[in-house]
Image (tube, rainbow, N blue to C red):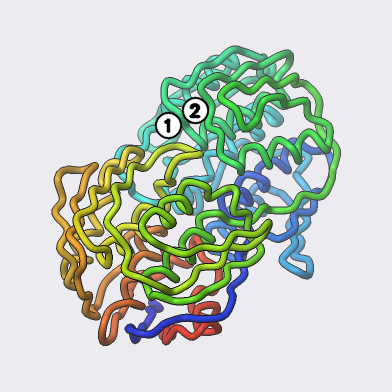
Amino acid sequence: MEKLIIHGGNKVHGSIDVKGAKNHALKLIPAVFLSQEATIIKNIPQVEDVFRMLEIVKNIGGKVELLTNNSVAITPPKQFNGKLPKDLIPKLRASLVLLGPLLARYKKVELPNPGGCNLGKRPINFFIDGFKAFGAKVVIKKDAYKFSALHGLKGCNFIFPNISVTGTETLMLAAVLAKGKTILENTATEPEIEALAIFLNKIGAKIYGAGTSTITIEGGNLLEGGEAEVIPDRIEAGSFAILAVATNSHLKITKCNPKHLAVPLKILNDIGVKIKIGNNFIEIFSGKQIKAHGIFTHEYPGFPTDLQAPMTVLLTQAHGQSLIYETIYEGRLFYTDTLNAMGARISLLGPHRALVNGQTKLHGKEVASPDIRAGIAMVIAGLIASGKTVINNIYQIDRGYESIDLRLRKIGAKITRIK
């Protein structure tokens, strides 16, 4: 097992590029199955979750060709036996998105219980109810779900009882090949969804309203091949901005889209951070003491749940009390026990709320990364802590952040990876 060693208490400096958005790449790859031909995906992040998705594609007969400059060409198989690999699906929660295009094109899919981060209760009811609305049959087994639509999917009207990003993307992809019109309501509005629809429309789909709460799809025909480019990762950009503030550093974050981070950047400004924003960069300046601030996670364009853990680390350095209210995932605040072991004073008020008492000095400890976002929070905590921090289980960090140790070393962080 690999681990990260961090010697904290130092500022970072210079500039750091943002890589492609993991959560966009993981939806573009399944979208390839809607096409008759090869699709080239550019700016694909070199992270473990993407590697797992490409493994699944190859396992079920797709052709994957790695190109230069972080690009990949994928050709869907002409036939698929309906079985997704039991050894790979539990490693990747985003594998659920494969259901949409595979069922719509190949008529049957057997899905082992999906995995990924263990963040509270994450049922797949949306997917079951959604595919039933498309006319599919669903059989629930002890260790798998069997979906079938031997006569093809039919367009439908479906209202999500709760906003779901993955649910929106999966049913939108299914609707591209479903016969007739589909209207999805109460849909998620994340930038990755709009970017996915823009690409699909470019190669022949008819999707209207992506990026709003109602999406209409005119479906029925296989799409052409084409080229897609993964948009910048807004969560990575936000994490780097928080890292810069936490270490009181001057850092320029490049190749990003600041418009996708309007709320987090507004909050950083409100707590006293000096920020310069361009079309494709965010520049954080070191400066005065930051103030406490309440954080209420919300679906886009609200404060992202994926930035909640890094922001909580930052608020341990703020003057005063900050209330963190996690509204998306139950149990996503349990990592705060680890921060307390490092010297933070955080009171857990239940599965959704925590009170952060700042300003506290953190001390290096041996910790573990419980999930992707808490993992990068541990990296930030290690960078501001005095002494040495050892982070175990860094596969979780590698799932979402490309070569994080190498990139942070280039901006002055004292971080190394060891076996």
Question: Which residue is at a point 63% across and 51% down the rendered structure image?
Answer: 25
270 with respect to 164 (left or right): left
Relative to residue 299, is residue 263 depicted above or below? Answer: below
In the rendering, at what x and y percent does residue 110 appear?
A: 53, 35
Which quadrant is home to the C terminus? bottom left
Q: Amino acid at mark 1?
A: Ile
Q: Please tell me which residue is depicted at 44% across the width and 76% down the height of the picture.
A: 249
Identify which residue, 312 or 31, lies in the foreground.
312
Question: Residue at point 17% right, 72% down?
Answer: 343
Dot 1: element: loop
Residue 259, position as x, y percentages in the image: 60, 48
Above or below, 161 against 189 in this view is above
Residue 56's tag is none
In the image shown, does 402 or 257 lie closer to the viewer? 257
Residue 325, position as x, y percentages in the image: 27, 43
Label at residue 127: 2
Q: Residue at the location (76% across, 69% down)? A: 69
Q: Is the residue marked by circle 1 packed among few (<14), some (14-19), or many (20+) residues within 10 Å?
A: some
Q: Amino acid at mark 2?
A: Phe
Q: Are marks 1 and 2 in contact (CB under 8 Å)?
A: yes
Q: Is residue 395 left or right of residue 64?
A: left
Work out whether residue 193 or residue 222 is closer to the camera in this orientation and state it: 193
Q: Position of residue 124 (x, y in %)?
A: 42, 31
> Secondary structure beneath disc 2?
helix
Which residue was labeled with disc 1?
124
Relative to 401, say whether 268 is above or below: above
Q: Is residue 64 left or right of residue 390?
A: right
Place residue 316 in its image quadrant: bottom left
Q: CA distance from mark 1 to mark 2?
A: 5 Å
